[in-house]
Image (cartoon, helix red, strand yellow):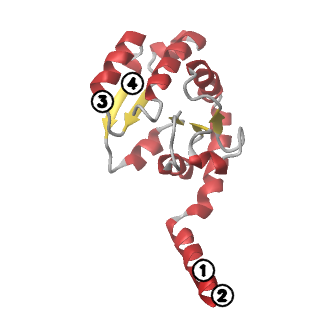
Amino acid sequence: MERKGLFYLLQSLRLLKKMLVPEIFNRGKVFLIIAGKGDEEYFRREAKILGVERMIRFAGQRNDIYKYYASADVFIMPTLYEPFGMAVTEAMASGLPVVTSRQAGVSEIITEGEDGILLDSPADPEEIARRIKPLIMDKDLRLKIGQKARKKVESMSWDKMAEETVNLYEEIKEI
């Protein structure tokens, strides 16, 4: 959770709470589901200090993560370092607009503003909040970016990747 930028995401929630229309937060329409393993108690304490504890839910490590993608509106992972980030491509395949950092290897397949949002500085809560806000406020934008994200990763299925790997081996074998 630390490397994934959760602390900065929690700080951005505090800023979003101030930036957005109060009734969005009062009705519980904006909240963060945190899946994965990490020091949950530490992040609960930090969320309480930041005044966003009511906006977060911990789901723990999941085998049924697809259910969470299906119920989400946006996927956010402001990672400080990530070699690739399967979670990002899974979210894209689920039709979610993704917000991640340029430090994630998966950022190489994302076209900024078209099929995802790329953060220049994942440790900057203001940038995170500013980049998330339009996605919260504009359902059409979420759907547009999510649809393009899904289309982008359709060619990256396990079957397709296995087929391309076999084809590469066949090419090398002929050389």
Residue 143 falls in image quadrant: top right
Please tell me whether mark 4 sits on a helix, a strand or a loop: strand
Q: Amino acid at mark 4?
A: Ile
- How far apart in space, not on screen, are marks 1 and 4 (Cα)? 45 Å
Mark 1 and 2 residues: CB-CB less than 8 Å, in contact? no
> Which image quarter holds the C terminus?
bottom right
Question: In the displayed structure, does residue 69 sit left or right of residue 152?
Answer: left
Frontmost of labels 4 and 2 is 2
- How far apart in space, not on screen, are marks 1 and 2 (Cα)? 13 Å
**Image height check: is 77 above or below 173?**
above
Q: Which residue is mark 4?
A: 56
> Which image quarter holds the N terminus?
top left
Mark 4 and 3 residues: CB-CB less than 8 Å, in contact? no
Q: Amino acid at mark 2?
A: Ile
Estimate how packed mark 3 is, as few (under 14), some (14 to 19) or many (20 or more) residues with alpha carbons within 10 Å: few
Counting the numbered discs, the total is 4
Estimate how packed mark 4 is, as few (under 14), some (14 to 19) or many (20 or more) residues with alpha carbons within 10 Å: some
Question: In the displayed structure, does residue 10 sit left or right of residue 122?
Answer: left
Foreground of the two, 148 or 50: 50
Mark 2 and 3 residues: CB-CB less than 8 Å, in contact? no
Please tell me whether mark 1 sits on a helix, a strand or a loop: helix
Q: Amino acid at mark 3?
A: Asp
Foreground of the two, 154 or 167: 167
Q: Which residue is mark 2?
A: 175
Estimate how packed mark 1 is, as few (under 14), some (14 to 19) or many (20 or more) residues with alpha carbons within 10 Å: few
Which of disc 3 and disc 2 is earlier in sequence? Answer: 3
Q: Which residue is mark 3?
A: 39
Frontmost of labels 2 and 3 is 2
Mark 1 and 4 residues: CB-CB less than 8 Å, in contact? no
